[in-house]
Image (cartoon, rainbow, N blue to C red):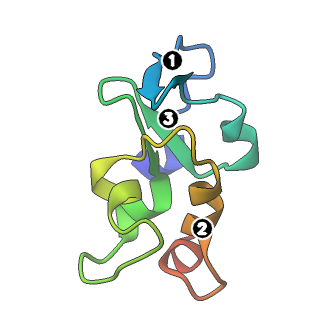
Amino acid sequence: MYLQNGPFQPKNHQFPQSNFYSDLRRFNAEWFREYDWLEYSVTKDAAFCLYCYLFQDESINQGGGNVFSTIGFTSWNKKCNLDEHIGKPNSVHSQSR
């Protein structure tokens, strides 16, 4: 059922700002269009990978480790980490899709 509903993507949510050094950053809802696997937890103010959350084996280390499956991604100033998470065709993320 969870997989049928797809990732939780509250596009109209007012994402809170966080301090990153001297800059204020927040989750960018535009990322939902670029990364269809990305979901956002309002309560944790963190992003997760739907596929890795559901299917990642705990013994496997994927780009970002368990940040995208259990801890939650909050480095809003490092969008490049989203691309690194996807990895190569044989990555956990790619195989889970």
Task: Report, in whole angstroms, how far the alpha carbon at label 3 lies from the one at label 2.
Answer: 21 Å
| Amino acid type, callout 2 | Glu
**Looking at the image, which residue sits at the far bottom?**
90
Marks 3, 1: nearer the viewer: 1
Residue at the image position 36 percent from the left and 72 percent from the top: 56
Callout 2: SS: helix
Residue 46 in the image: state x and y as whole percent. 40, 36
Location of residue 51 in the rendering, given as x and y in whole percent from the top left corner? 48, 61
Of label 1 and label 2, which has the lower sequence position? 1
Question: What is the spatial separation of the Cα atoms under label 1 and label 2, in whole angstroms?
Answer: 23 Å
Residue at coordinates 24% horizontally, 75% vertically from top-left? 58
Tell me what residue is drawn at x 55 percent, y 66 percent: 85
- The earlier-in-sequence mark between 3 and 1 is 3
Q: Which mark is residue 8?
A: 3
**In which quadrant will I find the C terminus?**
bottom right
Above or below 12: residue 57: below
Residue, disc 2: 84
Label 3, label 1: how many angstroms apart (C-alpha)? 14 Å
Q: Which residue of the protein is positioned furthest toward the left in this rendering?
A: 58
Q: Is residue 22 left or right of residue 28?
A: left
Res 43 → quadrant: top left
Q: Identify residue type, mark 1.
A: Phe
Q: Residues within 10 Å of mark 1 (few under 14, many from 20)?
A: some
The mark nearer the N terminus, 3 or 2, is 3
- Residue hosting label 1: 15
Q: Provide the secondary structure element on which disc 3 rests.
A: loop
Taking the image as drawn, is residue 1 in sight? Answer: no
